[in-house]
Image: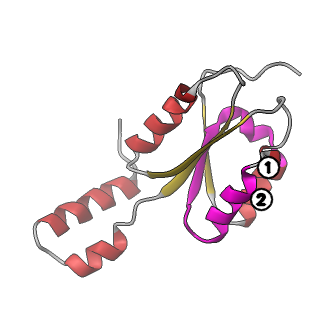
Amino acid sequence: MSRTPQQRIRRALLAEAASGGHREEAAVRIARARVVLYDWRLSTQDGQSFAPHRIYAEARDWMVVAEVAYTARHGVSAMTCPLWPCIAELIDSGQVDGIVTSAWNTTDDKFLSWLLDHHVFVVCIDTATEAPAT
């Protein structure tokens, strides 16, 4: 896997800090991205449904703050999840920088607009779990 420019800079800063150089400056600039793994799931799925999300986040050295799954019929906004206010609070308080979710969430305009308004990044990955037809 090729590294992103952000990852290369972070790794260079870590190496510099490990060798004793510019410790205070490096500590400020090395912050890890903090994310919530957030996804719809079938009521019959187990906790393994977050495995692709976690693999994606860990490959980028992102810190997973929370995992939130919700069950709803496909086509309902991700913001209708009963736990959405908790996630919104994490975002509003600056504890989360982004959300890792499934590709089907790219059709949720209300969800994507809210994230854009709050300057939060969203990564929509292909989890190979198909949402049921409506």
> What amino acid is at disc 2?
Trp
| Residue 95: quadrant of the picture | bottom right
- Quarter of the image with the N terminus in it: top left
Q: Residue at x 29, y 73 (%)?
A: 27
Q: Quadrant of residue 6?
A: bottom left
**Residue 1 on the magenta span:** no
Position in image of residue 82 (x %, y %): 78, 48
Task: Assess whether residue 92 is covered by the magenta stretch.
Answer: yes
In this rendering, position of residue 78 left or right of residue 120? right
- Residue on which the image places disc 2: 114
Q: Are marks 1 and 2 in contact (CB under 8 Å)?
A: yes
Callout 2 environment at 10 Å: few (<14), some (14 to 19), or many (20+)? few
Label 1: few (<14), some or many (≥20) within 10 Å?
some
Q: Secondary structure at mark 2?
A: helix
Whichever of callouts 1 and 2 sits on the residue coming sooner in the sequence is 1
Identify which residue, 6 or 93, lies in the foreground.
Answer: 93
Horizontal side of 43 relative to 20 (left or right) equals: right
Measuring 11% from the left and 72% from the top, which residue is drawn there? Answer: 20
- Label disc, if present, on residue 120 of the rendered structure: none
- Disc 1 designates what residue? 79
Disc 1/disc 2 C-alpha distance (Å): 9 Å
The amino acid on which the numbered mark 1 sits, given as a three-letter code, is Met
* 36 versus 41 height, above or below: below
Asked whether, in this view, residue 78 is left or right of residue 6, the answer is: right
Q: Nearer the viewer, residue 23 or 39?
A: 39
The x and y percentages for residue 32 are 40, 60
Residue 18 point in image, percent of width and height: 14, 64
Which residue: 14% across, 75% down?
Answer: 21
Which residues make up the magenta segment?
A: 83-109
Q: Is 96 drawn above or below residue 42 in the view shown?
A: below
For the residue pair 72 and 108, the one nearer the viewer reads as 72
**Local secondary structure at mark 1:** helix
